[in-house]
Image (cartoon, helix red, strand yellow):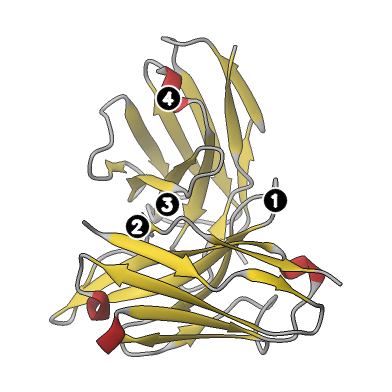
Amino acid sequence: EIVMTQSPATLSVSPGERATLSCRASQSVSSNLAWYQQKPGQAPRLLIYGASTRATGIPARFSGSGSGTEFTLTISSLQSEDFAVYYCQQYNNWPLYTFGQGTKLEIK
Amino acid sequence: EVQLVESGGGLVQPGGSLRLSCAASGFTFSSYDMHWVRQATGKGLEWVSAIGTAGDTYYPGSVKGRFTISRENAKNSLYLQMNSLRAGDTAVYYCARGRYCSGGSCSPHYMDVWGKGTTVTVSS
């Protein structure tokens, strides 16, 4: 099983500032990585797939990078609606998908 | 509008069974892989099962032999039959749309549409 490790567990950032979230895979997943955003009481929402491609309707302030085992989600200028939990997911090892444990992005 | 709506959750005793349903609309259901993903309260996401467009099924070890995923394309519906339920199966269960396949070509395996979830509680 590929283990996905996200850091930090909690990130405190002020509105308007940049947030950088990390995700590491225990073995290479190539670029087969997605990022999801989840707000309290809501379902996850796809943000990024293919490590760096924004999903339909996702604002340009969200960007993804990385390949192999190291990945980053960057939110360039935080808006109030961006404070949520973010999960990475590898889909390289089909069908044994695995998610990271999540990073909670909170208002500083 | 592309939509997934889960139903069938509830309270069940340990060892009991439950069948979840997911109604799909707004897209060609038969052309997509489909998934179930669960989330225990305050915890992360756990992939539970997948079914391909050809009806091939997949499970992680934690539910293999207890859960059965199925689909009925004529009804645009996805199901999850859960048997021998345990307290550890308590969670919100989401259905999610996966890979699109057409004419022998498929998109990557990310999950691009999710339902709002249905809650399963296993307790005596």
Q: How crowded is mark 4: few (under 14 residues within 10 Å), some or many (20 or more)?
A: few
In the rendered image, the vertical position of residue B26 relative to residue B105, given as above or below: above
**CA distance separating discs 1 and 4:** 22 Å
Q: Name the residue under label 1.
A: B41
Q: Which mark is residue A81?
A: 4
Count up the numbered dots.
Answer: 4
Tell me what residue is drawn at x 41 percent, y 9 percent.
A16
| Tags 3 and 4 on a common chain | yes
Q: Mark 2 points at which residue?
A: B113
**CA distance separating discs 2 and 3:** 16 Å
Amino acid tagged 1: Thr
In the rendered image, the vertical position of residue B31 relative to residue B56, given as above or below: above
Amino acid tagged 4: Glu
Q: Is disc 4 placed on a helix, strand or loop?
A: helix
Which part of the image, by quadrant, shows the C terminus of chain A?
A: top right
| Tags 2 and 1 on a common chain | yes
